[in-house]
Image (tube, rainbow, N blue to C red):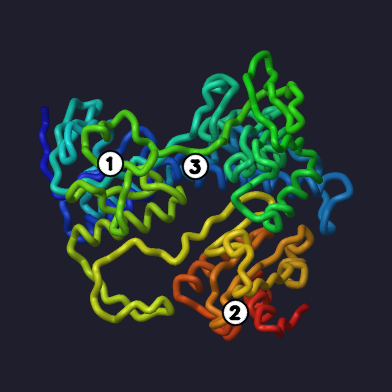
Amino acid sequence: MQQIKTKVLIIGAGTGGYVAGIRCGQLGLDTVLVDGSDGLGGTCLNVGCIPSKAIIHAAGKYETVLKAAGDGTLGITASEPAIDLSKTVAWKDGIVKKLNNGVAALLKKSKVKVIKGWATFADAKTCTVVTDEGDIKITAEHVILATGSEPVELPFLPFGGDVISSTEALSLDAVPGKLVVVGGGYIGLELGIAFRKLGAQVAIVEMADRILPLYDKALTDPVMKWLTNHGVEMHLGARAGGFGDGKLSITTKDGEPLQLDADKVLVTVGRRPRTKGWGLENMGVTMAGPFVKTDDRCATNMKNVWAVGDLTGEPMLAHKGSAQGEIVAEIIAGRERAQAASGRGASDSAQEKRFDPVTIAAVCFTEPEIVSAGLGPLDVEGRDDVIQSVFPLAAIGRALAIEAGEDGGFVRVLASKSDHRILGVQAVGQHVAELSNSFAQMLEMGAVLEDVAGVIHVHPTLGEAFHEATLRALGHAIHI
């Protein structure tokens, strides 16, 4: 058996693992990255964020052409379009392959040794990797666990055949005639909306009384309006049952049994950390429920064993894992930075790196899109020391010019009454995902309302709505 000793061993090549690997290599650390079943880039690049957004983009293009058929739209007319989903999927696969190759090139540039295979740990610092060329025993001084997450399977709706997860949904060779989505969270809605645009009849079954229950109703109402206007069959407060003979059994909110016709049943009831099958139980790390417990340095209770990404808990977002991976690499390399003084009262002295973000912004790529960063109305309910200001996209010229201002979209700002410190920013509307970084940046910098109000925002852009929302919070919005 081949044996390798290394400074850093990373398990998992997703956004947390490969970013940690690249940064470790840049810092001169001898690094081995074990790439398991998902491939370089992990779930996000291969079967999650990137391919889903590609399919969503293609669905939007198809819908645009479809609107141009018949009477036309915006003065544009076209013949009736057709969709060959197998070609769309092939285009999506080409994007994924290009990004795979890009990640591989970056790891090679950083001198990271990539091993394709499945690792199993015997103890906290030793694992055996089963590869096509034989087994490899690896011993490391530092171990970074970045195994990611996997779709939750319902015991009465096991994956297989016509019961699919988001992974299979992104590789279908034809648009299903009738698609039932079990789960009204962001994954189910993103894909359900995309397939509705592509022509499928879509039904959504959600246990909660409304879609996207983690977001406040004002944010989700425009999405619900789109679903209703486009004929998506909604079963809220309902429970799914078994599937057979092309029918999904559900129990409605009123307790009545109902059978839904379905060519495919897409189950999107959440994701769970991937903790099974690679010897985690032999490592002696402390757990926090289903997740690996870490401190604010991403360290576990075992010396020099670190964990990043979905394995460490909510929010299970790719950009969180990437940020954690970079920080862990720099901690291992002994890098410290001088923290510039910010609105959070940080000192100028050198401090050990910590994973302590003010916010991790989240985006739902629904129709329309939803962005949330920091505190929302549900977090400050009952408080009288918070200003809430809403500015409608319908009052923004750019939004109207790209048909993004007629769906009830808005930007909302929450700030402290006493010092005007911004506490949270949310938005709903077409293309508002591109505002998410601006929202997060202002929160991370400890900005006050006057900071955003004092920035000259470019006209015509959707970002003007953020500017106007802060002006409105200060009592003097211009365009409303």
Q: Quadrant of the N terminus?
A: top left
Upstream in the sequence, badge 3 or badge 2?
A: 3
Secondary structure beneath label 3: loop
Residue at image point 33% right, 53% down: 19
Residue, disc 1: 11
Q: Residues within 10 Å of mark 1 (few under 14, many from 20)?
A: many
Q: Is residue 191 left or right of residue 327?
A: right
Q: Quadrant of the C terminus?
A: bottom right
**Above or below, 175 relative to 242:** below
Residue 176: numbered disc: none
Cβ atoms under marks 1 and 3 closer than 8 Å: no
Q: Indicate which label's residue lies in the foreground, 3 or 2.
A: 2
Position in image of residue 11 (x %, y %): 27, 41
Res. 288 image quadrant: top left
Position in image of residue 289 (x %, y %): 38, 40
Q: Is residue 287 left or right of residue 164?
A: left
Residue 417: numbered disc: 2
Residue 48: numbered disc: 3
Position in image of residue 292 (x %, y %): 33, 44
Upstream in the sequence, badge 2 or badge 1?
A: 1
Residue at image point 64% right, 60% down: 431
